Amino acid sequence: MEKQRVRIENWAVVNDVISPSYRDLEPGRRLTGTVFAHADLPNGVIYTSSIVHVDAARGVVETQNRLYVLGQVSEEYRQWREQQGMDRAA
């Protein structure tokens, strides 16, 4: 069965819900942001399950349960990435 695709806007990458400091976009981390058209949740802010795969070229992040299509990155996360010297593609 194919995983549901969900759009996420104003997103950032965090370690987990308890320690929401920013992290690089990689497996083992979690996305947080505003989702739309989620099958089980109303539109709003969420923390995803752990990331298992990142397809940066397509702007898609796979978690244990869903595929998240990356929309606009949060301004705070974008600034954090710049301060860390990371690429500006996010």
Image (cartoon, rainbow, N blue to C red):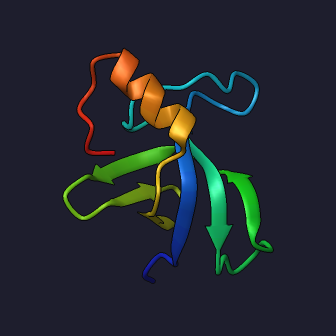
* Left or right placement of residue 27 versus residue 14 in this view: left
Query: In front here: 45 or 1?
Result: 45
Q: Residue furthest top?
A: 84
Residue at position x 44%, y 35% from top? Answer: 78
Quadrant including the C terminus = top left
Residue at position x 34%, y 50% from top? Answer: 53
Q: Residue furthest right?
A: 42
**Is the residue 62 above or below the residue 31 in the image?**
below
Q: Position of residue 18 (x, y in %)?
A: 76, 25
**Is the residue 88 above or below the residue 43 in the image?**
above
**Is the residue 59 above or below the residue 11 in the image?**
below
Residue 86 visible somewhere in the drawing: yes
Residue 48 visible somewhere in the drawing: no
Q: Which residue lies furthest to the left in this view?
A: 57
Q: Where is residue 63 in the image (x, y as percent from the top left)?
A: 49, 55
**Is the residue 47 above or below the residue 4 in the image?**
above
Residue at position x 36%, y 36% from top? Answer: 26
Q: Position of residue 17 (x, y in %)?
A: 73, 33
Query: In front here: 65 or 74?
Result: 74
* Left or right placement of residue 26 versus residue 29 in this view: left
